[in-house]
Amino acid sequence: MKKKLSARELGQWVDGLAAGARVIGPRAQQDKFAFDVIRGSDELRLDYDVTILPPRQFFQPACETLLKFGPATGYQSCVDEQPFVLFGVHPYDIVAIRQMDAVFAQDNADIRYIRRREAATIVAADVQRESSHVFAGWMGTSHVEDGFDVLITKIGESYLVDGRTEKGKNLMAGIRGAADAGPEDLKAREKVWKSNRQRLRKHTLKAEPARWPALLDAGYDHPVWKEKAERCFSCGSCVLTCPTCYCFDVRDDVDWSLQAGARVRVWDGCMLSDFAKVAGNHNFRKDKAARFRHRYYRKGKYVPSKTGGQIACVGCGRCATACVAKIANPVEVFNRLMEAD
């Protein structure tokens, strides 16, 4: 199902969705953007460059209650199955969600992630305005053709709305009176995709992603790890804003009665100083350079070995944006490794 909507028709559709469902989309937060619940089309910003945090927060929350316990209720598992519409997700984030889907379905499947994912209807949106650190064009993530329910592409002054799944087509049932998209509209979308492959290359990546595992195999003792890590604050901003990072810690929060409480899962990250601390106060990755190196091995070697070669970087540039020390850009690191190869 493909429709061509004017800006007014798109707004009417979004208003109708927001009136009857929980809709989450990009909203302006002063001079930045963040995914949040929207109450109408006037709050939705499809022209955003990049959000502060990726949409993974709605499938793997930063703080999530796994179970509650108490003397009267015993143990109660908590699973969130509330339906929602995730609106305006950029292509690189769609690729990241697909990767998370594969990871959380492996081995002992994570039922909480899966239930949230099943409850979601995802509306992707092609990038209208590139961010300052994006390099998705080099990573093959500047546009996508699957992994979503609906895709919106701005073509001229109109919007091509493409429903790909039953969920998506059901969502588009609220569109009234819009014209069907024709061959010329599809050609216009192809031009947007072609343009975005070039526009979303704010940094020049010399090392193509397929070579990353081999470069890491040869670069374990490369001086770049220590050079970059000397300026690292171990704040974890790079990994906590990454759409493909999913590490977590599990904690028990017990109330003052010592009779009741909750088990919670919270985001964690390999760049944090206590991430690798174990019993006996032993930290097997206490050196900043070792943590810095691990981040890149995780992206370019460890995750690809679990996901059939999928590199755990989609070129969104959030890490480079968030890093106050200006050392987190993967392009710079892999270019250095490439030069030494």
Image (cartoon, rainbow, N blue to C red):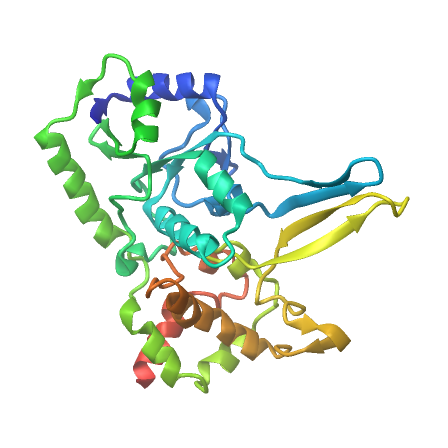
Q: Residue furthest top?
A: 177
- Vertical order, 3 against 294 (above or below): above
- Vertical order, 21 against 197 (above or below): above
Q: In the visual, does 152 lie left or right of 33?
A: left
Q: Residue furthest left?
A: 183
- Vertical order, 125 against 113 (above or below): above
Residue 36 visible in rendering: yes
In this view, the residue in front, 160 or 100, is 100
Q: In the visual, does 5 lie left or right of 329?
A: left
Q: Residue at x 35, y 19 (%)?
A: 13
Q: Quadrant of the N terminus?
A: top left
In this view, the residue in front, 72 or 5, is 72
In this view, the residue in front, 259 or 325, is 259
Q: Residue at x 77, y 42 (%)?
A: 69
Q: In the visual, does 70 lie left or right of 65?
A: right
- Rendered image quadrant of residue 272: bottom right
